[in-house]
Amino acid sequence: MNNKIHWAFWLFAILGLLWNVGGIINYMMQMKPDFVADLPDTHRAIIEGRPAWATGGFAVGVFGGTIGCLFLLLRKPLAGLVFMISLMGIFVTMIHTLQVVVAKETFAVSEIFVMILLPILVANLLIGLTFFAMKNNWLSK
């Protein structure tokens, strides 16, 4: 088996890191009432009514995803477990987000895609990348 790491591994690991760091920035900005006040009504409905357990899930999702990407860039198989924990955090926060989306009729399809489906898709792609890298012996213990 060829142990030469394909350039796409590095590209997707870096893009994943940038995505998750953006998630951390988003998380931090949502803690600022002045920032939240300027958001569209649909976004404010999610943020202002978010219970602590959903905020915790959001934090686990974005911080876990960032740590997972760092492990991936360091070529550590622990990235897979960290990404799975991150995905669980995403699912926890999505429970609240879906409750708000179902209760309101003003959400555009693009908002639903970006706020719900895209984070789940990216997390699953990073998990898949990790297991693909493990299968190809690109990760070291």
Image (spheres, rainbow, N blue to C red):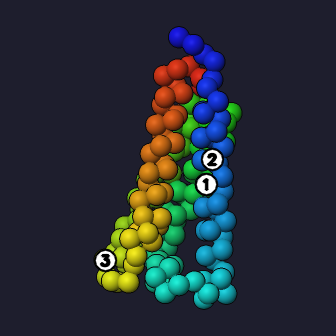
Closer to the camera in the image, 86 or 38: 38
Label whose residue precedes the other's in the sequence (1 or 3): 1
Residue 40: % across, % down: 53, 84
Residue type of the residue flagged with mark 2: Leu
**Residue 85 appears in the rendering:** no
Up-down relation of residue 49 to residue 28 (above or below): below
Are circles 2 and 1 on residues that touch, CB within 8 Å? Answer: yes
Is label 3 in a helix, a strand or a loop? helix
Please name the residue that numbered disc 2 is placed on: 15
Give the residue at x 39% y 78%.
107
Using the rendered view, name the quadrant where residue 23 is placed: bottom right
Using the rendered view, name the quadrant where residue 25 is placed: bottom right
Residue 32: % across, % down: 66, 81
Label 3 and label 2: CA atoms lie apart by 31 Å
Please name the residue that numbered disc 3 is placed on: 102
Kindly identify which numbered label has been placed on residue 19.
Answer: 1
Label 1 and label 3: CA atoms lie apart by 26 Å
Label 2 and label 1: CA atoms lie apart by 6 Å
Kindly identify which numbered label has been placed on residue 3.
Answer: none
